[in-house]
Each structure stands twice: as structure tokens, then as C-alpha cells.
Image (cartoon, helix red, strand yellow):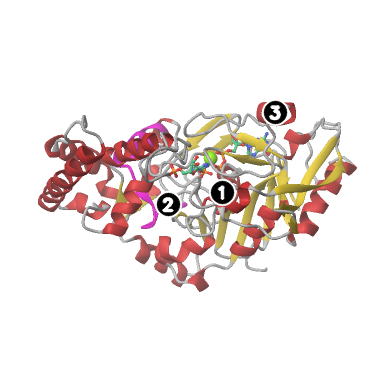
């Protein structure tokens, strides 16, 4: 008898601007792993999992939580809103998830209400053009379009060190109280400088709400780096769940229209506390078209009926904020860049069903920037804003494909579309998704 094959430690990361369907892929694969680990981001993420027609939205808890016996690990690189996490745990418990497998890193940083206040304050100031001109005569909207979940300010505090509070502090009431007092003193000065009418923070009120949430989270708090190293030692496989996506990466994305963490696979060692060699396979998740939420350049954006049709067919409204997502043709220049950065072994092509019924499908295979043609992505937001997409046109497919179970069952033009993607990005599509449900998946 041959021993069952053990999965390699695998990363699942988004290759575009988020919402590619990472949650669905994680849920699909999780049962074969000992643990599913979030290594970056916070409650700005919204990962949907659909099981037997029942939709679940996950923000902080790994999307593998619906598989009994699989550890659900929130790593040190995540920023955790403790109140939001408790709410999510309550929702998951009532949906029947077994939460005993949860582990939360003591080294993860907390997102508290004042981070959300600061996020909103910055966005409001930027939307009025603040800082765009020394004389303040320019009123261009410079806001990022954040989810206002406090992500940027929480990572800023982590990097600044002095005003940061970590999950581990929840285990030490005296230390927690002292830190909250110090932070409030500092933030009150900051908020007053930014906004004359700012309501002062109450250290006591924050301490109470954090302590209440902390009491609930306490049993799950641990050193997750050791937990993961033990699994590596035992050769038990780990699945790493990317949040946000590569083009939103703070270093490699379309800065400054990005989030504040290392979203791509390069963030896994630091955000989970495992050595780079522990990662053995990377699967990139991409939509069959492009979407983006919030501000920033988007060369293939469609502001016409086609964009509208994609939005409605794909139900492209945010899982976290409910905002309509900006929609456009597939940008293979951008996607190939993400495949390169992550070192993807394979990709999952999602939402192919949404493209049924279009006469023509366009894919962007180069940009023209200031009259120069290039097939290399530029993550510089100013340059990318000037990029004009150069399209290849492929014939569309008429038939609905939501019930296709194998690649051979797809219409010939849908297969050609997938094959063109594979040849351009240089990676095989090991998964093709034709609907939100677990069952609507073709593995090749
Ligand atoms: P994530 O943030 O990458 O996990 O993606 P989201 O969950 O935010 O957004 C993806 C959306 O597409 C969700 O509503 C999914 O249920 C849905 N979805 C995933 N795969 C498919 C698919 O193949 N077809 C369709 N029509 N919907 C899909
Ligand atoms: P998932 O994991 C789509 C975007 C926001 C905004 C920018 C910065 O569901 O794919 P932030 O609140 O992080 O400071 O916002 O990043 N953004 C996402 N867009 N999906 C996400 O996550 C996102 N996470 C952040 O819309 O433009
Ligand atoms: Mg999402």
C-alpha cells in the first residue's frame, strides 16, 4: 500500500487588487492541511466562502475554519481588532464552525477604535486635498479609499513602536492599562492637532472594552511561531492565506494606493514566523477579469455598459464595505508581474462564468506610456495612471458554464481564453472556478 501523499506547505495569494476569490480556494484546499494561517492584513479583508448555498464572510479568521481538526491560525503579521474578532467568532459559532482550533499570535498588534478614527480623519483630510500643495490651493482628492478599518494607523503604530499595543498585552492587565493611558495621552494631542473639535479619548472606556474582548480571546492566545515550527518538524502541511492582494502590497503594489502590509507571498516568513524555505508551493488567485475597490490607477477599467454588466453578473460589491467594485478587462501585464513576484507554481482562474455571453473578450497584454510600448508592469501610481492598455481580442462564449465539471466541458472559446492566460503568464491554471460554491470548481 502506498502512503497518502502529503501536501507541500502552500501559499494562496491574490494576484490583482483583492477579492479574487481567495476565500473560496482556501476553503476548498484547507481539509488537506494541518493548519491555515493568516499572515497579513486585518479586518480590511473580506473572504467569502459558500458551502451548500450558505454564504459566510470572514475578515480575521482564516477561511479554513469550516474544516474540523484544521488549526486556524492568526499570525503575528496580522493586525487584530479585538472587538471585531469577537463579533466574527460569535457569528461563526452560530454558523456551526468549531472554534476550538483557533490560535492567535501574542505578537500580533491590536487595532483599536482610535485607529479607525485616525484612518477616517486622514481620509477626510486627503479627500479635501490636504498636503497636495504647500499653499493648499490644490483641492485634488488624494484619499486612498481605505476600508476605514484602522489598518494604516495600526501598522504605523507598530512601526513607530512606542504607541503600539499587542495581543500579548491582553494577558497582563496592569501593563495593558498603563499602555492604554500612554497611548491616549499621545493620541489626544495628535487628534487635537488634526481636528480642533476632536472628542478626547477615554483610557478607562478603551480599557474596559479591550478587556471584555480580551477575556474572550485569552484561551486562543499563544506563540504561533512555535506552533507552526512544531507542525513543520512533524512534516504536517500548512496553508498560508493571503489577504488583500499583490497589487495592494505596501512595497510592490500601486503605491500609495495600497494597503499597509506585505500582502504577497514575500510576507509569509515575517508575518507567520516561518523560514522562507518552509514555503514549498504558491498558488496565485486571479479573476478572469479585473476589479479594484478604492482609489488608484486601473488601466483596464471599464466605465461603460460592459463594466456595469461585469459588476452585475459578478455581484461585484465589497464583502467588507459593500462598495461597488470598479470593473475592467483582464490585465495580464499586471497579473504576470504578480505571478513573477510571488513565484507562482500555478494559478486559480476565478469567476470565468461571469464572462459568458460577451461577443468579444479583451485582455491587456501591453501598455503604452507616453508613447512608449512596454509589456512590463509599473507599480508607480503616477506612471500607471498614464498607461493606456494595448488589447488582444478573443472571441467570447455564449453558453453559461456554471455547471461545467471538467475543462473539456467548457466551450471551445472559454478554453482558448484560459489557454491564452496560461501562455502569457507562464503558469498553468490548476483550478478554474465557475461559480461561488465549493462544488463549482474544475481542477485540472
Ligand atoms: P477574496 O477576498 O479574494 O476572498 O474574495 P471575495 O470573497 O471578497 O470576493 C469574491 C466573490 O466572488 C465572492 O462573492 C465569492 O463568493 C465569489 N466567487 C468566487 N468564485 C466565484 C466564481 O467562480 N464565480 C462566481 N460567479 N462567483 C465567485
Ligand atoms: P481581500 O482580502 C479589496 C483596498 C481598499 C483601499 C486600499 C487601502 O478581501 O481581497 P486599507 O483599509 O487596507 O487601508 O485600504 O486597499 N483593500 C482591499 N480591496 N479587497 C481587499 O481585501 C482589500 N483590502 C484592502 O479598498 O483601496
Ligand atoms: Mg474580499
- Does the image show residue 237? no
Q: Measure the C-alpha gap from mark 2 to mark 1.
A: 23 Å
Q: Which element type, helix, strand or loop, lies under badge 1?
A: helix
- Mark 2 closeness class: few <14, some 14–19, many ≥20 residues within 10 Å: many
Residue under numbered circle 2: 260
> Which quadrant of the figure has residue 222?
bottom left
- Is the shortest distance between ligand 1 and the CB of mark 1 under 8 Å? yes
Q: Is residue 245 visible?
A: yes
Observer-nearest of 88 and 153? 153
Q: Is residue 361 magenta?
A: no
Mark 3 near ligand 1 (CB under 8 Å)? yes
Can you identify the residue that label 1 sits on? 26
Q: Is mark 2 within 8 Å of ligand 2?
A: yes
Please name whichever residue, 397 or 260, is drawn nearer the observer in this view of the structure: 260
Instruction: Give the structural element (helix, strand or loop) at label 2.
Output: loop
Q: Earlier in the sequence, mark 2 or mark 1?
A: 1
- Helix, strand or loop status at disc 3: helix
Q: Residues within 10 Å of mark 3 (few under 14, many from 20)?
A: few
Magenta range: 70-91
- Camera-side residue of 249 and 284: 249
Q: Position of residue 174 (x, y in %)?
A: 10, 51
State the image coordinates of residue 67 (x, y, percent, origin top left).
50, 46
The residue depicted at 27 percent of the width and 48 percent of the height is 219
Marker disc for residue 313:
3
Residue at (15% x, 53% y) in the render: 172
Amino acid at each position: 500500500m502506498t502512503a497518502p501523499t502529503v501536501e507541500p506547505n502552500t501559499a494562496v495569494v491574490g494576484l490583482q487588487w483583492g477579492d479574487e476569490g481567495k476565500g473560496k480556494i482556501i476553503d476548498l484546499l484547507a481539509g488537506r492541511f494541518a493548519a491555515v494561517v493568516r499572515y497579513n492584513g486585518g479586518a480590511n479583508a473580506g473572504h467569502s466562502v459558500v458551502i451548500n448555498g450558505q454564504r459566510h464572510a470572514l475578515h480575521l479568521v482564516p477561511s479554513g475554519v469550516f474544516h474540523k481538526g484544521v488549526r486556524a491560525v492568526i499570525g503575528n503579521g496580522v493586525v487584530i481588532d479585538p472587538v471585531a474578532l469577537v463579533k466574527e467568532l460569535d457569528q461563526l459559532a452560530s454558523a456551526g464552525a468549531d472554534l476550538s482550533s483557533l490560535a492567535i499570535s501574542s505578537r500580533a498588534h491590536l487595532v483599536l477604535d482610535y485607529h479607525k478614527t485616525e484612518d477616517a480623519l486622514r481620509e477626510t483630510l486627503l479627500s479635501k486635498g490636504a498636503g497636495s500643495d504647500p499653499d493648499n490651493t490644490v483641492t485634488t482628492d488624494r484619499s486612498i479609499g481605505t476600508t476605514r478599518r484602522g489598518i494604516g494607523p495600526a501598522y504605523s503604530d507598530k512601526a513607530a513602536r512606542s504607541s503600539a499595543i499587542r495581543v500579548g498585552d491582553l494577558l497582563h492587565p496592569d501593563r495593558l492599562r498603563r499602555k492604554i493611558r500612554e497611548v491616549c495621552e499621545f493620541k489626544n494631542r495628535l487628534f487635537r492637532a488634526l481636528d480642533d473639535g476632536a472628542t478626547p479619548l477615554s483610557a478607562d472606556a478603551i480599557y474596559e472594552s479591550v478587556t471584555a474582548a480580551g477575556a474572550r480571546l485569552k484561551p486562543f492566545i499563544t506563540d504561533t511561531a512555535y506552533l507552526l515550527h512544531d507542525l513543520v518538524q512533524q512534516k504536517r502541511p500548512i496553508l498560508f492565506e493571503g489577504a488583500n492582494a499583490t497589487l495592494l502590497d505596501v512595497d510592490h503594489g500601486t503605491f500609495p494606493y495600497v494597503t499597509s502590509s506585505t500582502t504577497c507571498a514575500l510576507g509569509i516568513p515575517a508575518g507567520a514566523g516561518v523560514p522562507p524555505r518552509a514555503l514549498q508551493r504558491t498558488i496565485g488567485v486571479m479573476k478572469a477579469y479585473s476589479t479594484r475597490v478604492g482609489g488608484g490607477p486601473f488601466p483596464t477599467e471599464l466605465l461603460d455598459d460592459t463594466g456595469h454588466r461585469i459588476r452585475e453578473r459578478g455581484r461585484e460589491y465589497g464583502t467588507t464595505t459593500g462598495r461597488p467594485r470598479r470593473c475592467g478587462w483582464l490585465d495580464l501585464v499586471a497579473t504576470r508581474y504578480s505571478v513573477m513576484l510571488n513565484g507562482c507554481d500555478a494559478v486559480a482562474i476565478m469567476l470565468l462564468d461571469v464572462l459568458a455571453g460577451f461577443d468579444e473578450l479583451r485582455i491587456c497584454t501591453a501598455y503604452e506610456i507616453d508613447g512608449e510600448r512596454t509589456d512590463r508592469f509599473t507599480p508607480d501610481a503616477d506612471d500607471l495612471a498614464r498607461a493606456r492598455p494595448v488589447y488582444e481580442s478573443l472571441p467570447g462564449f455564449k453558453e453559461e458554464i456554471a455547471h461545467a465539471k471538467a475543462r473539456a466541458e467548457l466551450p471551445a472559446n472559454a478554453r482558448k481564453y484560459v489557454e491564452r492566460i496560461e501562455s502569457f503568464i507562464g503558469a498553468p491554471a490548476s483550478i478554474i472556478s465557475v461559480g461561488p460554491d465549493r462544488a463549482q470548481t474544475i481542477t485540472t
